[in-house]
Every structure is written in structure tokens, then in C-alpha cells.
């Protein structure tokens, strides 16, 4: 289930679950809902099981009152007035409006809200699951990578919505800015221990760095004391009786110091990714001239496109899901041809493209080493290739796939490890231009930092589609905004935003505030 009311369990059960009191409503958004014929808006309303039950009881009581018996009708000891009072406490009358606010913030149009959930892709069903949890407003909300399937618009809205959230939310996320915007405390899992810090993620980094500096100073002081004691013991341990006695005393002090030695908590180093580029090409590498594109003649996705991409370009493409960001990348690399105008590429241009679809198309039973060896001239019938096993393993090691990881089947790798394999494949081709479509999905914070560092060192051009503030802010110096048309008959646009990524998000926040989408849909339950 995408939403789960977690039952109470007895304290300290052997399976390690933490006891949760029965009156605490906890919801965990971890996977997409199952699609069926239920309209999206109705599926969100039905997520509030208490309200649904009360409405059913109300109807049963109204039916009983119509039987003419004259007695006050009850269902399970509950009368009609009690039902009305509780429905009023839950603001039942405006439930549909509140659900609509949440869905609008997550990118659903009024038309989308009436469509069956089965018509939506997995990413959009994840949004429905998230909308259900936000609508119910549980006492404890658990969000596992909530930004993975959201665009910049939806992430910005969710940040503003959670800022005003009056109950407890626990978030696991690789999105650094999202954590900074939404959290007030940080729990750090390191070496099988939990470390608690007050403040958001940036505060955690600063405090931890200060603590580490202090511990390093204490450890250095302890080290000097230990060395001094060892020298004294070595010198006088077997000498004069009085000095030997002092040496024994020093041995006890040494043992105590070693038992109390400060453990310095070193950071894991950032993964050092490396994207070598081909020789520089003179501009323009790609020219988009008066181009338009539509999957059908009746519906043009966008038109009047005029852009250029060079080897020194650092472009981020942003906009709502469904506007055609990934399609625009396909126009750049030649996977799709414009229906009008031209997209011209340098004759010697080499392009490498990262997509989640490419990862899904990897042979799941093949290991990473074999996958890399196929990138040469292929593997012959006798098992030989122009890429040796040693070369493949050394190359994979540069992308964090060392040891047994490189020999595990692709299906046994985590999402982040599969992404690293895809990065290794991109680097192998030494391209002039990197096209990256949501490269941070499934990556941890440290790998995202390593990716940003590698892209800044890359000497070719970069065009990326990403909702990750950190990556876009560190890498891109130009924003192209893809916006859909107002209706099916109006083409969308691709325009250059004159400003920084933070200024673009500020513009989105102001739009949400103007439409009253950041504070609606929230109630205080009176239990």
C-alpha cells in the first residue's frame, strides 16, 4: 500500500518495531498507488477513512429515520448528531476543495482530477499517493524520497506546504535544498548509529564539522600524552624500584587514556566521478532554427524554437512535468526530428545522454564488467574483447563500483549503483556534449556533490533536466523554461529565464501564494 495506518505493537518486539500508541495516525508514502477506475479527486477523498466511514453511517442513519418508527436511530451506538458534529470538526463540507488544492499544487489540472487513476504513469501515481497523505494530515507523516517524481514546480509547492505543516514529518531525501527548507532537526545514520542534530541539513554540516575539529584537537592531545607515557614506561619500567613503581602507575594511566580515546568521525570522501571530453569543437555544436515539434499534427507541443548549444554551454531545462522537457532533449540529440524548422549538429559532434529509461534497458543478468566490455567492439564468441576485464574493473572503480559490486548482476545493484554504471558508460564515450535527464534520482547527497564537481570539471557542454536545486545551482549558468500551452490547441514555449535558479523558484513561490495554494487543505483534527 502507498498509505498505511501503522498498528500499535507491544514495546520492544523482537522484530525491532518502535511502539506507536493507538491514537497516533501514521502514514508512510513509499510507493505508487494501484491504478483503477476511481477518479483522482475521489481517490484522495477516500483516503480519509474516518470521513468516509462517517458519511456511510450518516446515510444509514438517514435511511433508518425514514422507516417511521419515531425512535432515534443509531449505528454502533452512534447517533446522527454525533456524526454531524464530527464531520464538522473534520471540515467535511470543504473536503473536496481542500483535496483540489493539494492536487493542484502537485501539478494536476481540473481535467486530470476527474480522470481514472489507472490512466496515469507510475510517477503521477506517486503524486496521488502523496496527495492522499497530505490531505489526511496524519499525526506522523513519513516521506521516502518524495521529490523523486516531482518537477521544480511541485517541489517548490511541497516545500512551502510543509513549512506550514503543524504535525510531525520525517523525511528521507537526497535533495539538499528540500531538506534545508522543510526540516528543523536532522538524524544522521553513520556506522550503524544514529546521531541527532538540531537544525536543517546545512546546520548539521556546520555543527558536525565543528565537532570534528574539536575531537581532532582532543585526539591529538591524547596522542601526545600516550606517546609521553609510553616513553616513560619504556625507559623506567625495569629500572630502580621507585621508578618502576611510577612506570606501573603510568601504565594504568595509559590504559585509561586508551580506553577513553576520542573516536574522530571522518566524513566519507565524495565519489570522484570523472567525465573526460573529446577535443573542443568550434561553435555552434547544435543550432535550433525556427523549430517546432508535435507528436500529432493536431497537437503541437511547442514552436518557434531558436537556440544554440556549444562546448562551453551549461544549461538547465526546467518546467512542469508533461511540458516536454525530455522531448526537447530528444530533439537535441536527434532521437526526434522537428515537424517544422531545423536542428543542425556539427558533423563531428559526439553526444552522450543519460536517462532513467536507459538504465531500465540494461541487461539485468549481466554484470557491470561485462556491460563495460561490450562498449568496445563487443564480446566475441570466444569471450574476448578489446576491453580487458582489468581495464573494465579499473574504470568502474572510478565510479564507485569496486570489488564484488562490479561482478554482481545489474539486477542486484541499487538504483544509485545502476546510475553510476550509466555514468561510467557516458564517460567511456568521451563526448563533446552531455545530455542528462533527471540524473540525481536514486543518488545520495554525497554522490550528487561528486556529480556536480565532475560536471564542472568536464570540458564539454552540459544540458540537464533536473529538479535538484543543488545540482542546478552548482552547474547551470543558463535556464531554459519549457511551458505547456494553455490548452490542447495552443503550442507550448521554450524561453530563456533571465535570472538565477533561486530567483526562478521565488517566482514560483509568489505564484503559489497568489493562488492561495500553500496554506489550503490543512485542518486541525479535534480528537
Image (spheres, rainbow, N blue to C red):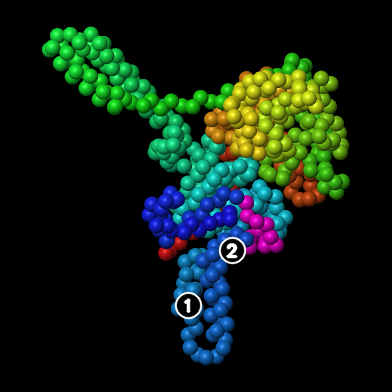
Dot 1 or dot 2, earlier in sequence: 2
| Mark 2 residue element | helix
Q: Give x and y (percent) for residue 326.
A: 73, 38
Q: Give x and y (percent) for residue 72.
A: 48, 85
Q: Is disc 2 surrounded by few (<14), some (14 to 19) or many (20+) residues within 10 Å?
A: some
| Mark 1 residue element | loop
Q: Give x and y (percent) for residue 254.
A: 25, 20
Q: Is residue 37 magenta?
A: yes
- Which residues, given as a range, are shown in magenta? 32-42
Q: Give x and y (percent) for residue 104.
A: 63, 53
Q: Residue at x 58, y 56 (%)?
A: 1
Q: Residue at x 61, y 22 (%)?
A: 398
Q: Is residue 434 visible?
A: no
- The residue identified by callout 1 is 76
CA gap between label 1 and label 2 equals 21 Å
Q: Is residue 179 visible?
A: yes
Is 43 on the left-hand or right-hand side of 28?
right
Q: Is residue 401 magenta?
A: no
Q: Does residue 419 lie above or below 254 as drawn? A: below
Of 209 and 254, nearer the camera is 254
- The residue identified by callout 2 is 46
Of 494 and 59, nearer the camera is 59
Q: Residue at x 50, y 49 (%)?
A: 142
Question: In the picture, which quadrant includes the C terminus?
Answer: bottom left
Q: Quadrant of residue 207?
A: top left
Is 144 on the left-hand or right-hand side of 391?
left
Amino acid at each position: 500500500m502507498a498509505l498505511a495506518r501503522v498498528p500499535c505493537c507491544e514495546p520492544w518486539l523482537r522484530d525491532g518495531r518502535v511502539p506507536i500508541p493507538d491514537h497516533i495516525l501514521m502514514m508512510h508514502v513509499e510507493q505508487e498507488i494501484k491504478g483503477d477506475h476511481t477518479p483522482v479527486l475521489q481517490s484522495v477523498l477516500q483516503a480519509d477513512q474516518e470521513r468516509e466511514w462517517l458519511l456511510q453511517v450518516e446515510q444509514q442513519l438517514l435511511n433508518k429515520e425514514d422507516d417511521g418508527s419515531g425512535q432515534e436511530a443509531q449505528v454502533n451506538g452512534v447517533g446522527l448528531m454525533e456524526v454531524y458534529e464530527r464531520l464538522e470538526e473534520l471540515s467535511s463540507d470543504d473536503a473536496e476543495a481542500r483535496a483540489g488544492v493539494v492536487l493542484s499544487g502537485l501539478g494536476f489540472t481540473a481535467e486530470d482530477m476527474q480522470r481514472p487513476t489507472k490512466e496515469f504513469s507510475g510517477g503521477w501515481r506517486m503524486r496521488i499517493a502523496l496527495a492522499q497523505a497530505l490531505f489526511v494530515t496524519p499525526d506522523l507523516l513519513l516521506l521516502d524520497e518524495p521529490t523523486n517524481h516531482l518537477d521544480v514546480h511541485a517541489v517548490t509547492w511541497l516545500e512551502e506546504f510543509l513549512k506550514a505543516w503543524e504535525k510531525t514529518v520525517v523525511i528521507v531525501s537526497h535533495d539538499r535544498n528540500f531538506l534545508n527548507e522543510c526540516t528543523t532537526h536532522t538524524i544522521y545514520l553513520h556506522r550503524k548509529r544514529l546521531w541527532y542534530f538540531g537544525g536543517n541539513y546545512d546546520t548539521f554540516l556546520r555543527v558536525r564539522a565543528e565537532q570534528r575539529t574539536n575531537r581532532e584537537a582532543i585526539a591529538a592531545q591524547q596522542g601526545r600524552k600516550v606517546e609521553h607515557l609510553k616513553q616513560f614506561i619504556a625507559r623506567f619500567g625495569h629500572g630502580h624500584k621507585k621508578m618502576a613503581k611510577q612506570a606501573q602507575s603510568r601504565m594504568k594511566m595509559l590504559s585509561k587514556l586508551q580506553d577513553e580515546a576520542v573516536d574522530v568521525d571522518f566524513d566519507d570522501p565524495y565519489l570522484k566521478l570523472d567525465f573526460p571530453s573529446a577535443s573542443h569543437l568550434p561553435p555552434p555544436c547544435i543550432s535550433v532554427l525556427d523549430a517546432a515539434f508535435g507528436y500529432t499534427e493536431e497537437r503541437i507541443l511547442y514552436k518557434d524554437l531558436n537556440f544554440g548549444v556549444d562546448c562551453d554551454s551549461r544549461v538547465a531545462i526546467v518546467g512542469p512535468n508533461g511540458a516536454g522537457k525530455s522531448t526537447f532533449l530528444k530533439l537535441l540529440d536527434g532521437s526526434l526530428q522537428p515537424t517544422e524548422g531545423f536542428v543542425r549538429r556539427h558533423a563531428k559532434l559526439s553526444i552522450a545522454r543519460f536517462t532513467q529509461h536507459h538504465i531500465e534497458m540494461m541487461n539485468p543478468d549481466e554484470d557491470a564488467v561485462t556491460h563495460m566490455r561490450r562498449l568496445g567492439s563487443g564480446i566475441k564468441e570466444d569471450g574476448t574483447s578489446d576491453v580487458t576485464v582489468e581495464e573494465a574493473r579499473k574504470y568502474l572503480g572510478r565510479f564507485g563500483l569496486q570489488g564484488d559490486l562490479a561482478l554482481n548482476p545489474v539486477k542486484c545493484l541499487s538504483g544509485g549503483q545502476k546510475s553510476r554504471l550509466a555514468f561510467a558508460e557516458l564517460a567511456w564515450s568521451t563526448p563533446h556534449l552531455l545530455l542528462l535527464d533527471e540524473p540525481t534520482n536514486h543518488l545520495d547527497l554525497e554522490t550528487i556533490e561528486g556529480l556536480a564537481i565532475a560536471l564542472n570539471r568536464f570540458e564539454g557542454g552540459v544540458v540537464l533536466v533536473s529538479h535538484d536545486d543543488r545540482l542546478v545551482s552548482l552547474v547551470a549558468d543558463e535556464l531554459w523554461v519549457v511551458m505547456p500551452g494553455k490548452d490542447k490547441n495552443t503550442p507550448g514555449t521554450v524561453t530563456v529565464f533571465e535570472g538565477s535558479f533561486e530567483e526562478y523558484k521565488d517566482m514560483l513561490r509568489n505564484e503559489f501564494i497568489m493562488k492561495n495554494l500553500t496554506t489550503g487543505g490543512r485542518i486541525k483534527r479535534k480528537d
